Image: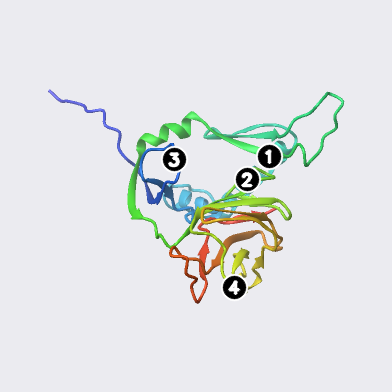
Amino acid sequence: MSMINNVNERLHRIRVKLYPSYLPSVDGRYHAKTNNEASLTIEEVCAALKNRGGFAGNYESLIENVRQFFNEAAYQLCDGFAVNTGFFSIHPNIGGTFDSAKDSYDEKKNPISFRFRTLSALRNLVKHISVDIDGVADNAGWIDEFTDTDENAVNSTFAENDIFCITGNRIKVEGDDPSCGVYFVPVEDSSKAVKVTRIAENSNAKVIGVCVKTGYLHNRIEIRTQSTNNHKLLKVPRVIVSDFVLEEA
């Protein structure tokens, strides 16, 4: 007689670091955060499909077909249609409110955004994922989230003159060194970094200011500060770099 055990094999692995939790209503000292540095491009996913997934077609044609699909999906989204990929769906969303049916659309009062919803096919994959904890993150300071509050976009996009909110740990901009500040830094050329000139709030856990323009599509956030935990300023500013990349709208 044989026995069959219904065991869910863990086929995937996610590595995380632990960050202190400052939310008073949440139990536990730390929360886990994945490494956003491991963001794959269309080319890399297509390469994995061919090398690991056994795709037998032409690699260059695959990339072009995927790009055409996303271009068409974006076109349909801009015409008001939701797009269902089978694993997640994307929906156009109009923010704000209207006073009456006679109101006209105001792009500032009623910003357009796109919302993602995970579907059951993707949610069901969770049972096949294991999590490895790589210890506690460096306590020298880090950027947790960047939010373009006008677009309600988190760690994704920004637009010139929009209000941003950066949250993290030990990120207060402090010091008399002229290099201290918040910078938008192009990935392609870090020498073209643009310093934020308007900051409204500045603390160890939150910095609020106005987005600047770099002219580059892909950018990181840098905070250069002389602040420390013991209220003594560093002689040389330390640099805190976001582990995520933002796209300039």
Image location of residue 183, percent across then percent down: 62, 64
Classed neighbour count for the residue bearing mark 2: other residues with Cα under 10 Å, few (<14), some (14–19), many (≥20): some
Determine contact: label 2, label 3, CB under 8 Å: no
Residue at the spot of label 4? 176
Sequence-earlier tag: 4 or 3: 3
Give me the C-alpha separation between circle 4 and circle 3.
33 Å
Query: Left or right of 34: which side holds 114?
Result: right
Q: Nearer the viewer, residue 86 or 196?
A: 196
Classed neighbour count for the residue bearing mark 4: other residues with Cα under 10 Å, few (<14), some (14–19), many (≥20): few
Sequence-earlier tag: 1 or 4: 1
Give me the C-alpha separation between circle 1 and circle 3.
31 Å
Marking on residue 24: 3
At horizontal 52% and vertical 62% (from top left) the residue drawn is 241
Classed neighbour count for the residue bearing mark 3: other residues with Cα under 10 Å, few (<14), some (14–19), many (≥20): few
Image location of residue 118, percent across then percent down: 52, 34
Residue at the spot of label 2? 153
Determine contact: label 4, label 3, CB under 8 Å: no
Count of all numbered marks drawn on residues in the image: 4
Type of amino acid under label 2: Ala
Label 2 element class: strand
Give me the C-alpha separation between circle 2 and circle 1.
8 Å
Determine contact: label 1, label 4, CB under 8 Å: no
Type of amino acid under label 3: Pro
Marking on residue 113: 1
At horizontal 71% and vertical 61% (from top left) the residue drawn is 213
Sequence-earlier tag: 2 or 3: 3
Determine contact: label 1, label 3, CB under 8 Å: no
